[in-house]
Amino acid sequence: MTGTKASILTTGSRVASSRVWIISGHYGSGKSEFAINYALRLRARGEKVALCDIDVVNPYFRSRERRGFLEARGIQVVGNSLAVDEGIDLPAVSAELYGPLADSTVHTVIDVGGDPVGARLLRSFRRLIPTAETELLCVVNAMRPATRTVDDLITQINGIEAASGLSVSGLINTTHLLEDTTAEHLHAGNKLCIEVGERTGLPVRFVGALEHIVSELPEEIQGERVGIAMHLRSSWMFAEKELRYGAK
Amino acid sequence: MNQTMNKVLMKGNEAIAQAAIHGGCRYFFGYPITPQNEIPEYMAREMPKVGGVFLQAESEVAAINMVYGAAGAGARVMTSSSSPGIALKQEGISYIVGSEVPCVIVNISRGGPGLGGIQPAQSDYYQSTRGGGNGDYNFIVFAPANIQEAADLTAEAFEIADYYRNPVMVLGDGMIGQMMEPVVFRDTPKRELQPKDWATTGTGGVRAPNIINSLHLQPADLEKHNEHLQAKFRLMRENEARSESYQTADAEFVFVAYGTSARIVRNVVDELRERGVKAGLIRPITLWPFPVVAFKELPDTVRGVMSVEMSCGQMVDDVRLALNGRFPVGFHGRSGGMVPSQQEIIEACLDMLKEVE
């Protein structure tokens, strides 16, 4: 980690003052689902919330596709500057993003595109990020082949930091295999996160998992619990009927 | 240990790329296009690790001709693209079939015609099964409906391509390329393969040169060549058709759908059965050869058959041919990247049942 990056808070004692959460990491790990669910949780606490989707990597399964659902729940959604939420893969980030970053009353979740490629976008507006109130988090899914080892994850984190010019401040254990997920997978993710933490000093800030799993996680699994309802998968994508009909 | 611990979570495109390497692919030539970009991205990263070659060509036309060259030299080789990119490759595909060299072509298809859009579509059915290139030719077209199947079929495609000395296509709509699912890479069914003694591997000064070519200027020679190719296509028709029949044994209404559409229709079948309509599904796994046997096996209780596609109606032609007038045939489709909903398919089924009464 180099000394040229903007200093983002890294210690647990300052977490209480966070109001911007930047969700980064390897694509396909669960960033967007975490971002949506965390935005909903902040809103449920009565906060003013904005969800800013600056993903220019994935062409499908972007959090802004759920604009209608989120806006109906009082969450501001920032998509791209062309005001089209589906069907384009242009890096057209909206200047609307500056609003929530500048407004100290808005709790802002930024859903970043995958990998250092997606994180590069952060560099263009890093001066606007209120660093003292911001957490830059990296998701960890130990079931994704490219992020199964400590070295892979440290490479990923270093890449995100180099691309964004910001320091990663914590990890999110989103380890899952969709509906095949069991607590065992989260244990594997927890172990991986702790090992990464030993090398980097990064804390496990959150653990995100399907509601029925997260509620039964033992204490040794680190991170604040965030129950995940899958908002981006259509009902037909689920093999199990209960999950299928329970989805949107 | 929990059995799922040996699985990994992959995007369809990544799983297809990894499955190709697992199936012995060591050469990849391609050109970027959404929604299949994770395939070349993965190949660029992983091919060098297994001693293979990834090359981003200057165009789709160049890529398919590089495939032609590598296949002619006896390599296991693949290219991937999406609909308009596959359109550009058609000439090369015709040459590859004519020259009898094996390769695998992946199409992660998007809406058309023309540049269309980047959302998922199934409007390349004609392009895949009828061919856009010249001449009398066919090749096997696999249409996976989930990521595990996409991985399994991609790995097996190399074995089958070598077996027939003919290309095999894996056709997934954009959703199959982009969605994430757990996957495990397992053993590929092996075929008895002949040595590639036709390949251009150098004569070593001891044999006559091998020539890879599709040019036969003497009409009688060309006709003989065509008869030889047709004999291969007949073998494929007889031996390679695959499908899955779901709840068809007592069905009064049968859907036909592949890929993403089949996933949706499977739920529709369950829901219709809960409402008392005996619905079933034939899911072609090979689009060519079309699984006509599954249609012959349909019971006489059937009152209507409906093709559900993310297109304006292409596979429905093959459904009509397979049924040969035995049952009324209907169609429900969405296009442009729109994915049909369960509800609209249920309504289309109920409407058709009323009509055929």
Image (spheres, rainbow, N blue to C red):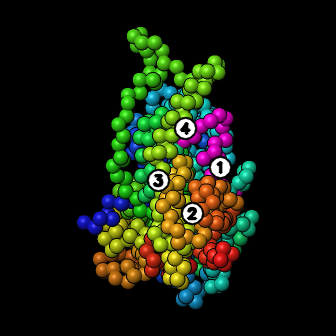
How many angstroms separate mark 1 from mark 4 (CA)? 24 Å
Q: Nearer the viewer, residue B95 or B315?
A: B315
How many angstroms separate mark 3 from mark 2 (CA)? 13 Å
> What residue appears at the point 48 percent right and 42 percent down from the top-left corner?
B236
Element carrying mark 1 = helix
Q: Residues within 10 Å of mark 4 (few under 14, many from 20)?
A: many
Residue matched to label 1? B126
Residue matched to label 3? B242
Pick whichever of labels 1 and 3 is earlier in the sequence: 1
Pick whichever of labels 2 and 1 is earlier in the sequence: 1
Q: Which mark is residue B29?
A: 4
Pick whichever of labels 1 and 4 is earlier in the sequence: 4
Chain letter, disc 3 residue: B
What amino acid type should be assigned to the residue bearing mark 2? Val
What amino acid type should be assigned to the residue bearing mark 1? Tyr
Mark nearest the camera among 2 and 1 is 2
Q: Residue A49: horizontal and vertical position, in percent?
A: 61, 81
Q: Which mark is residue B256?
A: 2
**Does the segment drawn in magenta span residue B135?**
yes
Chain letter, disc 4 residue: B
